[in-house]
Amino acid sequence: MSEQIMTVRSLKRREAFAAYAFILPTLVGFLIFVVVPMLASFALSLYDWNLLTPPEFVGLANWEKLFSDARVGGIYVTTLRLSLTVVFSNMTLGLLLAILLDSKLPVIVRNFFRISYFFPYVVSAVAVSLIWTFLFNRDLGPLNYYLGLLGVESRINWLNSSQWSPLAI
């Protein structure tokens, strides 16, 4: 009887060791790539440092300045609104696209949607960002050019305006 108990205990120990062995690499990666940078960022926030002068310890003064700034609330609201809009629209479009691809559409239509869905993964993100930057350019962008043809006189600064950049994104 005692031998069976020892076997069960050693089996449980081996299973626990295996579980920890599987969790350990993820835990180490999380510590190295998430926890350590967060702690380092917090430590840096306690200093006044512009890389040209030696760092000067200011304690929580930077945090006080951050939370006493009236613009911070607006920034959080804008970020939350943009995040919710992007998540909702992506989920809705993704669901509609999945329904379209699963339906009994003609093959050419299904292939068009499959290609248009997969295309952003194939095209380089840098090239896409350069194209969008050109399209939204204040002075040379075709978007402002065509808006000018429609009668919009002022050139819109799409990417550097707090009013227009959320729409451009």
Image (tube, rainbow, N blue to C red):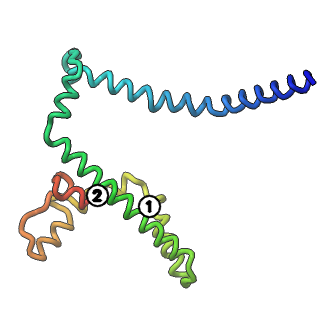
Left or right, 53 with reference to 91 = left
Image depth: mark 2 or mark 1 in front: 2
Marks 2 and 1 sit apart, C-alpha to C-alpha, by 16 Å
Numbered disc 1: secondary structure:
helix
- For this rendering, which residue is in front, 78 or 29? 78
Query: Does residue 134 sit above or below 142 in this rendering?
Result: above
**Amino acid on which the number 1 mark rests in the picture:** Pro
Q: Quadrant of residue 102?
A: bottom right
Which x, y percent locates residue 57?
A: 23, 15
Which residue in the protein does label 2 denote?
169
Q: Which residue is pictured at 21% across the width and 67% down the height?
A: 142
Q: In this rendering, is residue 93 above or below 26?
A: below
Question: Which tag, 2 or 1, sits closer to the chain's start?
Answer: 1
At label 2, the amino acid type is Ile
Instruction: Name, please, the residue furthest toward the left.
Output: 153
Q: Is residue 126 above or below residue 50?
A: below
Residue tagged 1: 120
User: Which residue is drawn at the image coordinates 17% and 52% (left, top)?
Assistant: 162
